[in-house]
Amino acid sequence: MENYLPLVVMLVLAAGFVLLSLVTTKLLASARPTPAKSAPYESGIVPKAAPPERFPVRFYLVAMIFIVFDIEIVFLYPWAVIYRDLGGFGLVEMLAFAVAVFVSFLYMLSRGALDWGPVKRLRRLDARDPGRTATTTIRRVGLEGRGDGGQPAQGPSTREVAAS
């Protein structure tokens, strides 16, 4: 039982700290909300615009790249310290781990993790069909139920195309 005494003391101290913090907060803190309390605060900078509703997926993909390489470095340091003791087995296992990390990196690249700025926009423009215009789309879809009488600006209507 005496082996568990330090653990019990730490748990009692932690519980006491939590209770003391809660009681102190209830006694000293004001419950009235103010604009200053509800305003976002980061590094003393007052935000000039509302934050976006969602972060873009690229943000998370770049974060995943950092995490993957952080994990790789965490595992490379101990391996580098004792690589002579591990021999060929350690080398094969580290190569297998490096291949797994590289494959995950290639996956993130294929999902567009590092496509930023105008390069992506140019790719999107290149992917468009040059023969497809607003006029050809209107001919295909038609204007029925649009409030302008259902008459297309140019070309035959959907009924005329269906009849022919």
Image (cartoon, helix red, strand yellow):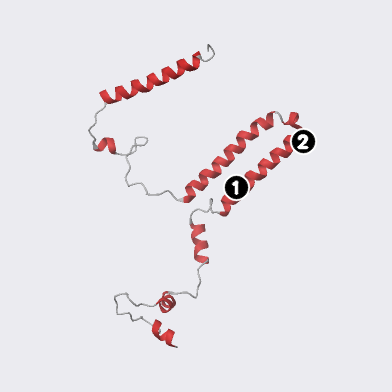
Q: Is residue 137 above or below residue 20?
A: below
Q: Nearer the viewer, residue 108 or 10?
A: 10
The quadrant of the picture occupied by the C terminus is: bottom left
Q: Is 11 placed left or right of 73 in the picture?
A: left
Q: CA distance from mark 1 to mark 2?
A: 25 Å
Q: What is the quadrant of residue 92 in the picture?
A: top right
Label 1 sits on what residue type?
Phe
In the displayed orientation, state which residue is furthest to the right.
88
Indicate the position of residue 97 as horizontal and vertical percent values. 66, 41
Residue shown at 69%/42% (left/top)? 96
Q: What is the quadrant of residue 82 in the picture?
A: top right
Label 2 sits on what residue type?
Gly
In the displayed orientation, state which residue is furthest to the bottom.
164
In the displayed orientation, state which residue is furthest to the top.
2
Indicate the position of residue 71 as horizontal and vertical percent values. 59, 37
Q: Is residue 71 above or below residue 111?
A: above
Residue shown at 34%/38% (left/top)? 45
Indicate the position of residue 67 as horizontal and vertical percent values. 55, 40
Label 2 secondary element: helix
Q: Disc 1 designates what residue?
A: 105
Check residue 146 in the rendering and tell me which mark sits there, or answer none: none
Q: Disc 2 designates what residue?
A: 88
| Label 2 crowd (10 A; few <14 / some 14-19 / many >=20) | few
| Label 1 crowd (10 A; few <14 / some 14-19 / many >=20) | some
Residue shown at 68%/32% (left/top)? 79
Q: What is the quadrant of residue 153 in the picture?
A: bottom left
